[in-house]
Amino acid sequence: MYFFIIYLCGIWVFCSSRKHLLITLLSLEFIVLVLYLSIYFYLCSFNYGLFFVVYFLVFSVCEGSLGLSILVSMVRSHGNDYFQSYSVLQC
């Protein structure tokens, strides 16, 4: 139940903050971390193998590095990470 409340808090932050790209990426990483912990505890409670947790962690690290590289390229091209300062059609 606690993981569900924490997950909903992460979804709320993701939906409510649309000003900065960095805050959006941090809330997505928070959601992935909560999902990782909930899957880990779920698999440990049934004594399953934890190889799926390693795969999930690898994909979440790849997702985080991709988001960070997109953030760096947008800051280099536009100068900041505000969503209002650039159009999606120009990128």
Image (spheres, grey):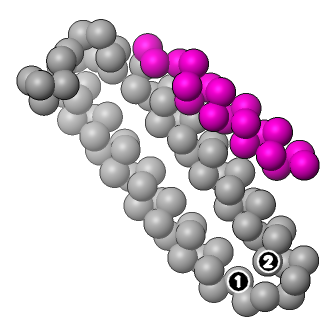
91 with respect to 74 (left or right): left
Closer to the camera: disc 1 or disc 2?
2
Q: Considering the numbered disc 2 on the image, is that residue within a helix, a strand or a loop?
A: helix
Asked whether, in this view, residue 89 is left or right of residue 74, the answer is: left
Above-or-below relation of 91 to 53? above
x, y (%) of residue 47? 86, 87
The answer to whether marks 1 and 2 mark residues whose Cβ atoms lie closer than 8 Å is: yes
Task: Identify residue type, mark 1.
Answer: Leu
Q: Which residue is mark 2?
A: 43
Residue identified by numbered label 1: 50
Question: Between marks 1 and 2, how big is the CA–CA gap?
Answer: 7 Å
Q: In the rendered structure, which amino acid carries the disc numbered 2? A: Leu
Other-residue count near label 1 (Cα within 10 Å), few / some / many at <14 / 14–19 / ≥20: few
Magenta highlight: main SS: helix
Residue 76 versus residue 47 in the image, above or below: above
- Residue 53 shown in magenta: no
Magenta-highlighted residues: 1-19
Residue sitting at the far top: 84
Could you say which quadrant of the image residue 30 lies in?
A: top right
